[in-house]
Image (cartoon, grey):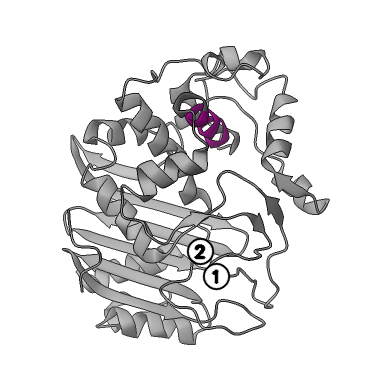
Amino acid sequence: MKKTMVPLCTMLFICTFFSCKNYETVDAYADAVYQKGELNGNVLVVKKDTILYEKSFGIAHPETKEPLTAKHRFAIGSISKEFPGVAVMQLYERGKLKLEDKVSMYLKDLPSWANTINIQQLFKYTSGLPRVAWERYGENQMTVTHELLINDLKKVKTLSFEPGSDYLYSNYNPILLIHIVEKISGQSFEDYVSQNIFKAAKMTSSYFGKATPWENEVLPAYAFDKESNLDAFKMDSLKFLMLFTAQDIYQYLYHLHSYQLLSKTSIKLLSEREGAQSPLGVLGWDGNELEFHHHHGEQGSYEAVIRYYPEDDLYIVILKNQKFFNVMDMADTIRKIVN
């Protein structure tokens, strides 16, 4: 195992406002983005087992002005969907399930559509399950709980399309994967992930949050908008509400791509896409060789991006608690500077 933090791609990535040709170092570039007012968060760059760059910019809370540090934890939005995917594939490798198994084989209290959707269709977002009504919850200032999500899911009588016939990105897919993990493992999803992913990947600082707005959490980076308003969206006891440090995200990526969490075959299966992304985001393959792993996530004013380039043994992690829709451009530019 590598020491713990010792000091896409088939599409065209373009440096935008900050041309990478103008910056000789990552620090000069990141500081320019910060000075422009578009970087409040943590940046980590690791290459060949060595931290090339790690720095925190801005504040953890708009009212207290507490400075961000490498120890602060961030929500990562859609990137958190990697964890139910990896968990299910671990159970698959142990012979506990088959990808063609129907949802109803494990979850008995769902409508009849559970008889028509298999696990692989949950992975590929081809199940036909509709989108979660996040806008309705927010507009009505509802506290989103796991029970609320499941109850609303049970009210779905008709799928958006026949399973396997189309693609629709819906959070209901990883939610069902979470419940399948719990049913098969006999553990809560939090306990399973903490033991089989966090601990296995030497992720020593990440944990499952309790509720938003955050209260009594350990070093959370509070999300806030450009007017310094804290995110007000209310969530409580959601099974996918996780907080991560940049270093732990690197540990996860390293252990995933050194095949300590899953085999290469399982990662390739999990990365198969019918639309914009898989549970792992976007992975590019040349035959059996991985070329890149890219995943972008948003949650309120949080924004994050992870990148892994095997050819360069390069990892880029950017976690923000103030969103400017520029983390992908930043990751592109950082890679060009490093290389």
86 relative position to 338: left or right = right
Specify the quadrant of the image occupied by residue 48: bottom left
Residues rendered magenta in the picture: 174-182
Disc 1 on helix, strand or loop?
A: loop
Report the magenta stretch's main SS. helix
- Give the residue pinned by disc 1: 221
Residue at (65, 22) in percent of width and height: 159
Q: Residues within 10 Å of mark 2 (few under 14, many from 20)?
A: many
Residue occupying the point 38% across, 38% down: 86
Res. 230 in view = yes
Q: In the rendered image of this protein, does residue 195 appear above or below residue 19? A: above
Residue nearer the viewer, 238 or 103: 238
- Amino acid on which disc 2 is placed: Phe
- Give the x, y percent position of residue 108: 61, 16
Q: Position of residue 165 (x, y in %)?
A: 51, 20
| Residue 114: in magenta span | no
Please tell me whether residue 133 is drawn above or below residue 296 in the rendered image: above
Is the residue under label 2 in contact with that under label 1 (CB below 8 Å)? yes
Residue 273 in which image quadrant: top left
Residue at the spot x=27%, y=78% of the render? 21
* Badge number at residue 284: none
What residue lies at 17% left-to-right and 53% top-to-bottom?
1
Q: Residue furthest right?
A: 140
In this rendering, the answer to whether 318 lies above or below 187 is below
Q: Which kind of residue does numbered mark 1 sit on?
A: Ala
Q: Which residue is mark 2?
A: 74
Give the CA separation, mark 1 to mark 2: 6 Å
Give residue 304's position: percent from left, percent from top: 47, 61
Kindly tell me whether residue 12 is visible in this rendering. no
Mark closest to the chain's N terminus, 1 or 2: 2
Comparing 156 with 97, the one in front is: 97
